[in-house]
C-alpha cells in the first residue's frame, strides 16, 4: 500500500523484536562458509531518522529502541546493526531490516529487496547501492525467485497489514513458498492487535506444519488508543539457537 510510511513506526517495540531475531538468524547463517540468499518482500527505506518529525509524532521509537537498547550488549548481532546504521546516518539513525541484513551478509551472498513505494526505492538505492533492488510487488517477486541461487537462505515477509486482504493472502503466500523452497528459512512478522484481528492469520499459520516455531511478545501500547499490543514472528527452518534467543528476548519483554 503506497500510503504506508514506516518512518512513523521505525524503532518501535515490534521492530526491536523482529530485527533482533532477524539479526540472530543471519549472524548464525553467515558463520557457515556456504553463500546464502536473503530476500525481503516489503523492504522500506532501510535507514530511518529517529530525530525526525515522524518518530516524534508517534512516540513509538521512544517506547521501543529508546527504552530497550540496553538489553543488547555490544557484541549482539542487533547491536552491530544499530552501530552500522549510525555509522551511515548519524547517532539518531535506525536500521530497517535491509540494513540489519546487510550488516551480516558477506560478499558472496545475495541481498534481494522488493519495495513498491518510489520514494522508498530511491532511499534504498542510496543506502545499499550493491543490493538487488526491485520496484515491484514483493510477494509476486518472491514467488518468481524461489528457490533462489544460492538455494540456502532466508526470506523475510513483513507487510504493513493495512490492506485487509493481506491477512488472508499472506498465509497462502507462506504455504506456497514452503512448497517451492522447502530448505529456506521463511520468517513472517505480524502484529498482535487488541482487536484480535491477527488470530485467524495465526491459526492458518499453525496449519501449514513443518519445521516451524513462533515467537510472540507483548508490550504496552506506545500511546493511548494504539491498537498494537504485541509482535509475532513465525519461522520455518529456524537456525540453530534461534528459539533459545527468542525465548530469552521474550523474557525481557515480559518484564516491561
Image (cartoon, helix red, strand yellow):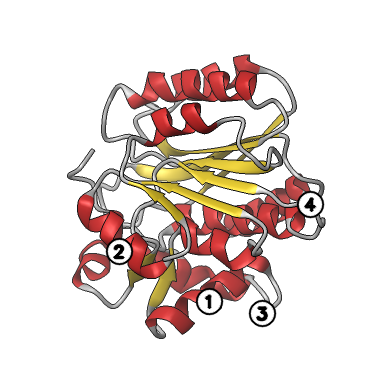
In the rendered structure, which disc, 2 or 1, sits on the residue that comes first in sequence?
Answer: 1
Answer whether labels 2 and 1 touch (C-beta < 8 Å).
Answer: no
Nearer to us: label 4 or label 2: 4
Q: Which residue, as the protein is rendered here, is positioned at the far top?
A: 207
Q: Quadrant of the N terminus?
A: top left
Disc on the earlier residue, 4 or 3: 4
Which residue bears the numbered disc 3?
74
Labels 3 and 2: the sequence-earlier one: 3
Q: Nearer the viewer, mark 4 or mark 3?
A: 4
Residue 98: x %, y % from top left: 48, 58
Left of 215 or right of it: where is 202?
A: left
Residue at 42% across, 45% down: 229
Find the distance from the CA under tag 4 to the CA under tag 1.
24 Å
Residue at disc 3, secondary structure: loop
Kindly identify which residue carries mark 4.
Answer: 34
Q: Could you give the CA–CA distance between mark 4 and mark 2, rounded to whole angstroms?
A: 30 Å
Of mark 4 and mark 2, the one earlier in the sequence is 4
> Which mark is in front, 4 or 1?
4
> Which percent across, then down, holds residue 128?
43, 66
Q: Which callout, 3 or 1, points at the residue further toward the start of the chain?
A: 3
Q: CA distance from mark 3 to mark 2?
A: 27 Å
Q: Nearer the viewer, mark 3 or mark 1?
A: 1
**C-alpha distance separating marks 3 and 1:** 12 Å
Q: Assess disc 2: are there few (<14), some (14-19) or many (≥20) residues with their C-alpha within 10 Å of its C-alpha.
A: some
Q: Which residue is mark 2?
A: 123
Question: Marks 3 and 2: which is nearer the front?
Answer: 2
- x%, y% of residue 47? 38, 67
Mark 4 vs mark 1: which is more N-terminal? 4
Amino acid at each position: 500500500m503506497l500510503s504506508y510510511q514506516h518512518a512513523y513506526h521505525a524503532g518501535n517495540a515490534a521492530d526491536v523484536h523482529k530485527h533482533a531475531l532477524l539479526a540472530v538468524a543471519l549472524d548464525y547463517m553467515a558463520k557457515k562458509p556456504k553463500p546464502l540468499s536473503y530476500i525481503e518482500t516489503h523492504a522500506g527505506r532501510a535507514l530511518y531518522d529517529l530525530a525526525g518529525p515522524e518518530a516524534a509524532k508517534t512516540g513509538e521509537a521512544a517506547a521501543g529502541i529508546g527504552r530497550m537498547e540496553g538489553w543488547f550488549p555490544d557484541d549482539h548481532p542487533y547491536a552491530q546493526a544499530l552501530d552500522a546504521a549510525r555509522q551511515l546516518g548519524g547517532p539518531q539513525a535506525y536500521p530497517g531490516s535491509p540494513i540489519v541484513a546487510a550488516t551480516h551478509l558477506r560478499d558472496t551472498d545475495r541481498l534481494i529487496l522488493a519495495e513498491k513505494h518510489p520514494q522508498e526505492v530511491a532511499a534504498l538505492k542510496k543506502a545499499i547501492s550493491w543490493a538487488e533492488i526491485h520496484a515491484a510487488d514483493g510477494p509476486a517477486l518472491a514467488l518468481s525467485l524461489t528457490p533462489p541461487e544460492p538455494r540456502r537462505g532466508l526470506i523475510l515477509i513483513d507487510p504493513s497489514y493495512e490492506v485487509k486482504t493481506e491477512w488472508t493472502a499472506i498465509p497462502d503466500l507462506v504455504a506456497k513458498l514452503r512448497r517451492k523452497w522447502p530448505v529456506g528459512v521463511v520468517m513472517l512478522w505480524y502484529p498482535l492487535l487488541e482487536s484480535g484481528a491477527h488470530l485467524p492469520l495465526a491459526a492458518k499459520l499453525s496449519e501449514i506444519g513443518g519445521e516451524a516455531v513462533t515467537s510472540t511478545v507483548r508490550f504496552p501500547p506506545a500511546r493511548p488508543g494504539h491498537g498494537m499490543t504485541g509482535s509475532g514472528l513465525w519461522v520455518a527452518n529456524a537456525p540453530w539457537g534461534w528459539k533459545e534467543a527468542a525465548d530469552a528476548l521474550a523474557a525481557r519483554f515480559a518484564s516491561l
